[in-house]
């Protein structure tokens, strides 16, 4: 250990990345987590004996930094996921296991004028994977980067391709997001996906073995003296001192924590938007899907955005996702899991014509009010404002889904970058 004590607020993948990378470099790290278990939006819940994920689950083959950590901890048992989605608007098929096939499907489903717009973007990501992240050079320097996706692409492309991507990743509609953040979405169809064979629990256990995780411990504010952040104040009022503080939460929570001490930075973080998401995993007594048809995408007038088999061989377990504008009021009404199930099953059956087998064996679900980040208007500018503000504050760092993008790999990278920055400053 090098004698430096670092506090990480939040044990989602962004915080775990910072914690793991700093621990590996000899720092003494303490992770504060308000919930009873670690993982944040990567966490799991029980569906009978099985741990099922109610948040991030699909791990791209191109998630190189996240996979490196898993490999170093010998927790890299992944199984093919190969989600195969069909939209009723077009014959779009997103086969997450075969990116080339998905790409062909995309290109054959959109007007030629949109292909011409999209090809250089696809090429930019393929040539330089950095363009899959918000810090990548391509999208943020485009002349028309502030153009809304709905103003740039035809309705056919929006309904068939773009909406399914942005509603899934950001819970947003195409008229809410601009081109500057589109690389994070487009990159999704240029990757193929797996999931943890036994869920991420073993990974969390390994991390808990080597890093101090203070679960059920909410940080209520930062302890700042003479403008310098010196520690954290916990909910019970106790104060703990650290050499550096990393806030690895959603931007809205980071903003609240910073408000009394760094109001300017807090105000900038308020610009970052979040959309609600609801997840319901339901187990049926017989298969709902076939091996050829493992998922459906739903149109904008539905509360559901997609529904898919939980795994390649779990065709009787359906993971229903509620996101997008139509779902907002319903999700804000704090629906019970019974209510989620009722709406999900009704829309699923109406839309797909599939009769769901009875009786239901088990279900579990959740609604996250700040579930999916939709970034901010002029996000490149917001990110530079955040950096500017941070440069005036010593020993305070931010990681999270709004910095590099919402994917697990993007969140990991935001945490990794913070670890590298701390190492440079403290060496
Ligand atoms: C439904 C859903 C499906 C998704 N699917 C995928 C997918 O298949 N593939 C993919 O790549 N990505 C996916 N994502 C995105 C990805 O999972 C998330 O972007 C990522 O997990 C966010 O991690 P994070 O660490 O930034 O934030 P979080 O996971 O939200 O972590 C923040 C943590 O901070 C804690 N916290 C908050 N306030 C305090 C406080 N005051 N004191 C202490 N602790 C605090 C919270 O409890 C939480 O644990 C999905 C997301 C959702 C919601």
Image (spheres, helix red, strand yellow):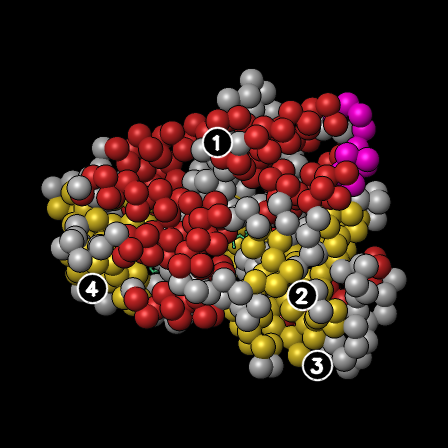
Residue where numbered disc 1 is placed: 136
Q: In the rendered view, would you say 359 is above or below 301?
A: below
Q: Is residue 122 visible?
A: yes
What secondary structure characterizes most of the magenta part? helix
For marks 4 and 3, give the CA distance.
45 Å
Mark 2 neighbour class, 10 Å CA radius: few under 14, some 14 to 19, many 20 or more: many
Q: Which residue is mark 3?
A: 361
> Is there any visible trace of residue 219 in the rendered image?
no
Mark 4, residue position = 237
Secondary element type, mark 2: strand
In percent of width and height, residue 328 lies at: 62, 52
Mark sitting earlier along the chain (4/3): 4
On the rendered structure, is 296 left or right of 275? right
Of labels 1 and 4, earlier in sequence is 1
User: Which residue has dot 2 on it?
Assistant: 311
Q: Residue 108 in magenta?
A: yes
The stretch in magenta equals 105-114
The tag earlier along the polypeptide, 2 or 4, is 4
């Amino acid at each position: 250990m090098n004698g430096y004590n670092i506090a990480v607020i939040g044990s989602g993948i962004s915080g775990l990345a910072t914690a793991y990378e700093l621990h590996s470099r000899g720092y003494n790290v303490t992770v504060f987590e308000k919930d009873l278990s670690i993982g944040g939006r990567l966490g799991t819940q029980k569906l009978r004996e099985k741990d099922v994920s109610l948040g991030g689950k699909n791990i791209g083959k191109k998630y190189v930094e996240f996979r490196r950590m898993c490999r170093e901890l010998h927790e890299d048992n992944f199984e093919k996921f190969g989600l195969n989605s069909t939209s009723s608007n077009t014959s779009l098929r997103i086969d997450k296991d075969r990116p080339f096939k998905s790409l062909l499907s995309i290109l054959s489903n959109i007007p030629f004028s949109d292909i011409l717009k999209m090809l250089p973007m696809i090429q930019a990501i393929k040539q330089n994977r950095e363009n899959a992240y918000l810090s990548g050079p391509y999208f943020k320097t485009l002349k028309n980067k502030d153009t809304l996706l709905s103003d740039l692409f035809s309705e056919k492309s929006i309904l068939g391709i773009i909406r399914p991507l942005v509603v899934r990743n950001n819970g947003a509609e195409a008229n809410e997001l601009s081109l500057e953040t589109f690389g994070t979405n487009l990159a999704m169809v240029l990757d193929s996906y797996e999931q943890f064979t036994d869920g991420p629990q073993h990974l969390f256990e390994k991390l808990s073995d080597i890093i101090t995780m203070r679960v059920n411990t909410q940080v209520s504010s930062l302890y700042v003296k003479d403008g310098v952040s010196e520690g954290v104040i916990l909910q019970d009022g106790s104060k703990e001192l650290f050499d550096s503080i990393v806030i690895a939460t959603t931007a809205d929570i980071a903003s609240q924590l910073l408000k009394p001490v760094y109001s300017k930075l807090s105000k900038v973080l308020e610009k970052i938007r979040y959309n609600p998401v609801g997840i319901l995993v339901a187990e049926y007594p017989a298969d709902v899907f076939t091996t050829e048809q493992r998922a459906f995408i739903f149109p904008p007038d539905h509360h559901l955005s997609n529904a898919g088999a939980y795994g390649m061989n779990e065709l009787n377990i359906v993971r229903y996702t509620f996101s997008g504008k139509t779902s907002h009021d319903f999700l804000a009404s704090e629906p019970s899991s019974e209510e989620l199930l009722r709406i999900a099953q009704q829309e699923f059956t109406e839309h797909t014509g599939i009769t769901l087998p009875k009786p239901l064996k088990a279900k579990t679900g959740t609604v996250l009010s700040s579930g999916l980040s939709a970034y901010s208007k002029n996000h490149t500018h917001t990110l530079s404002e955040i950096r500017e503000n941070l440069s005036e504050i010593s020993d305070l760092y931010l990681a999270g889904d709004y910095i590099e993008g919402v994917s697990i790999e993007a969140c990991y990278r935001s945490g990794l970058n913070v670890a590298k920055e701390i190492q440079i400053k403290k060496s």
